[in-house]
Image: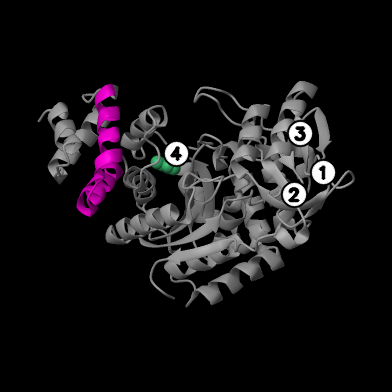
């Protein structure tokens, strides 16, 4: 088989069979298909799309390109959540321990920030001592003992996606329902899950800008995952403003710790976390329906059981034993903190979430190139949400920066990201815009 023949076939609108797709995926892993050929096929797929069968074949071949985890030794159902990526999206930090507190096992294999979006793994790197790349034995032990472990992707989990994604990232071929489906699900299915809930973001801060595009992605993800035997549902959630009131690695950990300890809870973040958790508990067979699942989530947040599981996970993976008691002291802080005020007083009408993400990257809290190191301390907090009043006493946000020049650059971006007006102009936009999956 020749890679160039497969590219020509797809370029001309043909359909690839499972054997041809398998050949391409094998070439991704062993290097026999060149970067140029990978990018050409990706671009052909962008324009010609994949059939449902091709999408499934690509997902399964990428899943099987490395180790597929097996959790059959556990006596708990194994579930996880995946977000398509957003700004101020620290849901995983609360969700995984809450699901564990409800009786699920959550082996959460998460990624680094991508473009303007944050990554769960980068957030955990700001906790001193926390090992994001434990060996397999420790990972399994923490999932078995605590019920959840949030770690980074290991080299042997869906290696085909690792190379494919890296090439797509620099060839303008990320935004494809077919390729995003195969990319996300190859990793999630390789993690050996029984149930999965997907948080498909739509809006200015998401990869899918419109609700229609997000719906198409959600339908594709849900169909392929359920077809592969993993019970899966998706919620479509709003990313037209940051979800948490913080964006930046250590700041989002602090925001999560505030949430878990009950010191301060962002309402939209709470609602999304509770609803995603309710879905996950149904897929796990731990709740009879979504309402009961959501109730169970509220209970473990209220009782402190979720916080306790978070603390145990942090300790088991090498972090401080008293992290939740003293997180302010443990998390790194930036030397410069400045309030960002609006150019004019008013009520926040909209926030360009993508611009907020870009401001964090500009501050050094995200990467411009994959090899960049990030500054965990920088970012934005106390971000005013839609409907909040802002003026010369009530800032848009507080910037945490490495120096004054960086703070000034971020200030300019944030001021431009906000539009203010009269309270009557505020549009009511639900944080959960839809759901895809079996009813329940
Ligand atoms: N996240 C992934 O893991 N893959 C994609 O293709 C896009 C978002």
Sequence-wise, the earlier of marks 2 and 3 is 3
Q: Quickly name the residue at label 4.
A: 153
Position of residue 179 in the picture relative to residue 347 (left or right): left
Q: Position of residue 153 (x, y in %)?
A: 44, 38
Sequence-wise, the earlier of marks 4 and 3 is 4
Q: CA distance from mark 2 to mark 3?
A: 23 Å
Q: Are marks 4 and 3 in contact (CB under 8 Å)?
A: no
Rendered image quadrant of residue 358: top right
Does the closest atom of ligand 1 sit within 8 Å of the Cβ of label 1?
A: no
Q: Which element type, helix, strand or loop, lies under badge 1?
A: loop
Q: Quickly name the residue at label 3.
A: 400
Sequence-wise, the earlier of marks 4 and 2 is 4
Give the position of the N terminus as an image quadrant: top left
Rendered image quadrant of residue 303: bottom right
Which residue is at the front of the view, 221 or 283?
Answer: 221
Q: CA distance from mark 4 to mark 3?
A: 29 Å
Q: What residue is drawn where x is 42% and y is 52%? A: 213
- Quarter, ligand 1: top left
Q: Tell me, yes or no, whether the highlighted magenta stretch contains residue 395.
A: no
Please provide the residue range marked out in magenta.
36-64
Which residue is at the front of the view, 29 or 314?
Answer: 29
Which residue is at the front of the view, 380 or 428?
Answer: 428
Q: Quickly name the residue at label 1.
A: 344
């Amino acid at each position: 088989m020749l890679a160039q023949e497969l590219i020509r076939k797809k370029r001309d609108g043909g359909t690839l069979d499972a054997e041809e797709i398998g050949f391409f995926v094998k070439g991704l892993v062993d290097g026999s298909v060149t970067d140029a050929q990978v990018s050409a096929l990706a671009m052909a797929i962008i324009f010609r799309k994949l059939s449902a069968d091709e999408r499934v074949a690509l997902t399964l071949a990428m899943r099987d390109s490395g180790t597929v985890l097996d959790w059959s030794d556990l006596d708990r159902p194994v579930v996880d959540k995946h977000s398509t990526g957003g700004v101020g999206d620290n849901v995983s930090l609360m969700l995984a321990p809450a699901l564990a507190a409800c009786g699920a096992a959550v082996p959460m294999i998460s990624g680094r920030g991508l473009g303007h979006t944050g990554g769960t793994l980068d957030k955990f790197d700001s906790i001193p001592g926390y090992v994001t790349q434990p060996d397999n034995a420790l990972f399994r032990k923490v999932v078995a003992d605590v019920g959840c472990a949030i770690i980074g992707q290991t080299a042997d989990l869906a290696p085909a996606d690792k190379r494919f994604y890296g090439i797509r990232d620099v060839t303008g071929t990320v935004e494809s329902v077919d390729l995003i489906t195969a990319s996300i699900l190859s990793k999630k299915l390789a993690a050996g899950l029984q149930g999965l809930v997907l948080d498909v973001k739509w809006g200015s801060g998401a990869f899918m800008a419109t609700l229609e595009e997000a719906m198409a992605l959600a339908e594709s993800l849900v169909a392929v995952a359920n077809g592969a035997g993993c019970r899966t549902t998706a919620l479509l959630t709003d990313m037209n403003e940051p979800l948490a009131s913080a964006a930046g690695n250590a700041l989002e950990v602090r925001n999560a710790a505030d949430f878990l300890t009950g010191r301060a809870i962002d309402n939209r973040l709470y609602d999304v976390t509770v609803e995603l958790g309710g879905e996950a508990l149904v897929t796990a067979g731990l709740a009879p329906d979504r309402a009961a699942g959501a109730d169970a989530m509220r209970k473990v947040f209220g009782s402190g059981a979720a916080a306790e599981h978070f603390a145990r996970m942090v300790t088991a993976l090498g972090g401080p034993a008293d992290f939740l008691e003293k997180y302010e002291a443990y998390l790194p802080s930036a030397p410069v903190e400045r309030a960002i005020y609006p150019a004019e007083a008013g009520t926040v009408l909209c926030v360009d979430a993508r611009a907020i993400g870009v401001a964090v990257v500009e501050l050094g809290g995200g990467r411009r190139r994959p090899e960049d190191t990030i500054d965990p301390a920088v970012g934005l907090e106390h971000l005013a949400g839609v409907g909040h009043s802002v003026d010369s006493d009530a800032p848009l946000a507080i910037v945490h920066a490495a120096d004054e020049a960086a703070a000034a650059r971020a200030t300019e971006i944030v001021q431009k990201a906000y539009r203010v007006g009269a309270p009557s102009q505020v549009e009511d936009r639900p944080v959960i815009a839809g759901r895809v999956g079996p009813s329940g």
